[in-house]
Image (tube, grey):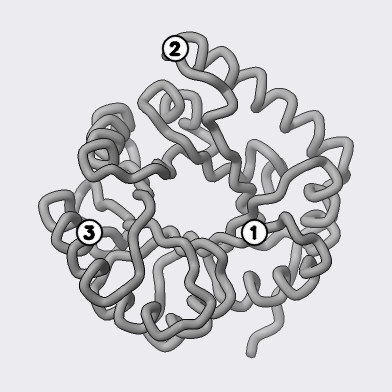
Amino acid sequence: MAEINFGEEVSKIEIENNIKEINDKIFVACLEANREPSEIEIVAITKTHSIATVRNAIDAGLTQFGENRYQELHEKKLSTEKFEKVKWHFVGQIQRNKMARIADEADVICSVDKPEQLDIISKSRHKPKLLIQLSADGDENRGGVVLDKALDLMLYAQNVGPLISGVMMVPPLGQDPRPHFIQAAQFAKDAGLETISMGMSNDYEIAVECGATQLRLGTAIFGTR
């Protein structure tokens, strides 16, 4: 297993200041969209950040964290096991040979997009919460299932056991995210799904306006790597 080179520690004070700025922007976005800030959950994306930084983020009040590589999720979850409220999300594309391990360790898997992943997850005793990753452009290299096949994937999940509780959307690079966010939120609403995970550091205010219930923020919280 290759060694991970974690970045420099980001202080608790810096994280707290950034969270305050984020919450102020969420408040304004909610005001404009006639929503309550309490509807919004922040998932801190900690990829390549040090375990010390994660602990500072916990001290700053964050409880939801995301990783896109199994090895980092494994090491950081082990280091934070004593914090009962902390939950770990897997947000990256899933390699088949790591699916069972991800299912056994992640509290939430945000990037489900294939029936065979559900087959493996159904055998896990851990039973993570699952989100379908919706593809906005059909690019298989970026992961996700196109909208007209997402309902079939949900029905397949019902047949094999693990239930889908939400959607995750990453809009295409260089495009206006609004129509993609709106489409994802409408799909979730029509399907009766509670979690709408969309919006990152560069577009989270738009995501809130479009109906996001969960934001995946890295740079906005920890600064540039």
**Residue 12 point in image, percent of width and height:** 87, 42
Which residue, given by chain and number where applicable, does mark 3 sit on?
Answer: 145
The residue depicted at 23 percent of the width and 60 percent of the height is: 154
- From the viewer's perspective, is 132 left or right of 148? right
- Dot placed on the residue nearer the N-terminal end, 2 or 1: 2
Disc sitting over residue 64 in the figure: none
Answer few, some or many: residues within 10 Å of disc 2's Cα (few below 14, many 20 plus, some between 14 and 19).
few
Which residue, given by chain and number where applicable, does mark 1 sit on?
Answer: 87
Q: Secondary structure at mark 1?
A: strand
Q: Secondary structure at mark 2?
A: loop
- Dot placed on the residue nearer the N-terminal end, 1 or 3: 1
- From the viewer's perspective, is 94 left or right of 155? right
Name the quadrant of the N terminus: bottom right
Disc 3 marks a residue whose amino acid type is Val
Which residue, given by chain and number where applicable, does mark 2 sit on?
Answer: 34
Disc 2 marks a residue whose amino acid type is Asn
**Residue 201 point in image, percent of width and height:** 55, 37
Q: Quadrant of residue 176?
A: top left
Q: Is residue 105 above or below residue 55?
A: below
- From the viewer's perspective, is 40 left or right of 76? left
- From the viewer's perspective, is 13 left or right of 193? right
